[in-house]
């Protein structure tokens, strides 16, 4: 049940997308719309997606965010959220990312999967996800909340496409039966120094649980995860702020490394 009118949804989508495209921050939208509900928040996100597709951008994947209990606590939110990824978010491995195109980027190490069967909720489980996983891919997300100082609540950040801005994949892609996503370790190094480490279990106990949650959340809007979808399952580590001049190398147990430079 939405509370905002179609025109307010469209206006807020334009406002947040402009902040992303012009790399400037804004106040969290619930300050002006305190009564907006969860449907409104996702309606704004879906409207941003529609705007990008209408402009010719391709949706190339989905993501879950705020999937670690530590991060939910850190950001003061109660639940994970989902968002979409479009073509221009993708940066090749060893590529460069211009900080002038972003507001206040942070990097987080993630495990992504590519599905080979449709996943449909409600009732989607870890077992269904593992049975539908074609491959496991190391991925690094660059998040960039459009909100001042990353200060937001869950509804505002859902509307802002979960702070999505860039992502990099690389390393070695493996089949689901070749890796244990739960114990898989990662190390983030910035300028050659280890800044944080983690294991896949930080993501809702198992990264596949995050994908199951995604299927179950999408079911509430009558949507499915189509076969062949690339899905980033959520940060294993805390998100680490980066600046121009930083070189990031994320080492994944069994999956190689993903690197990028900020200029
Ligand atoms: O991918 C994510 O976990 C993004 C969550 C959005 C919250 C944030 O910007 O930290
Ligand atoms: Mg993320």
Image (cartoon, grey):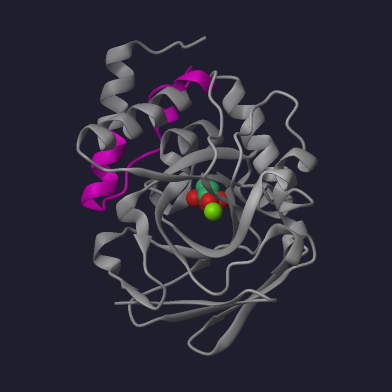
Question: Is residue 37 something that shows in the picture?
Answer: no
For the view shown, which residue lies furthest in the bottom direction? 192
Q: Quadrant of residue 210?
A: top right
Count of numbered marks = 0
Residue at image position (54%, 19%) is 221
> 90 and 99: which one is in front?
90
* Percent position of residue 214, x then y: 62, 36
* Percent position of residue 73, x then y: 69, 48
* Percent position of residue 253, x then y: 69, 76
**Range of magenta residues:** 15-40
Question: Is residue 129 something that shows in the picture?
Answer: yes
Left or right position of 19 against 200 = left
> 232 and 133: which one is in front?
133
Give the answer, above or below, for where 192 lies relative to 159. below
Q: Is residue 27 magenta?
A: yes
Left or right position of 95 against 131 = left
Q: Is residue 55 magenta?
A: no
In the rendered image, which quarter contains the C terminus? bottom left
Give the answer, above or below, for where 145 lies relative to 220. below
Residue at image position (26%, 53%) is 23
> 20 and 54: which one is in front?
54
Left or right position of 236 against 243 = right
Residue at image position (74%, 38%) is 128
Left or right position of 132 against 33 = right
Q: Quadrant of residue 176?
A: bottom right
Q: Quadrant of residue 89?
A: bottom left
Residue at image position (69%, 76%) is 254
């Amino acid at each position: 049940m939405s509370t905002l009118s179609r025109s307010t949804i469209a206006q807020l989508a334009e406002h947040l997308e402009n902040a992303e495209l012009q790399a400037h921050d804004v106040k969290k939208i619930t300050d002006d719309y305190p009564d907006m509900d969860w449907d409104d928040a996702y309606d704004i996100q879906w409207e941003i997606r529609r705007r990008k597709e209408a402009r010719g951008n391709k949706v190339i994947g989905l993501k879950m965010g705020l999937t670690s209990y530590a991060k939910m606590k850190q950001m003061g939110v109660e639940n994970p959220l989902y968002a979409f990824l479009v073509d221009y978010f993708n940066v090749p491995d060893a590529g460069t990312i211009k900080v002038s195109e972003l507001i206040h980027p942070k990097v987080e190490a993630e495990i992504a999967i590519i599905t080979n069967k449709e996943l449909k909720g409600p009732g989607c489980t870890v077992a269904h996800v593992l049975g539908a996983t074609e491959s496991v891919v190391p991925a690094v997300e660059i998040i960039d909340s459009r909100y001042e100082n990353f200060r937001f609540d869950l509804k505002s950040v859902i509307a802002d496409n979960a702070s999505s801005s860039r992502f990099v994949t690389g390393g070695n892609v493996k089949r689901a039966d070749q890796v244990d996503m739960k114990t898989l370790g990662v190390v983030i190094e910035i300028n050659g120094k280890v800044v944080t480490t983690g294991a896949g279990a930080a993501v809702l106990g198992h990264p596949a649980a995050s994908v199951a949650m995604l299927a179950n959340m999408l079911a509430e809007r009558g949507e499915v995860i189509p076969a062949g979808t690339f899905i980033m399952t959520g940060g294993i580590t805390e998100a680490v702020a980066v600046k121009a001049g930083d070189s990031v190398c994320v080492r994944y147990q069994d999956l190689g490394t993903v690197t990028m430079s900020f200029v």
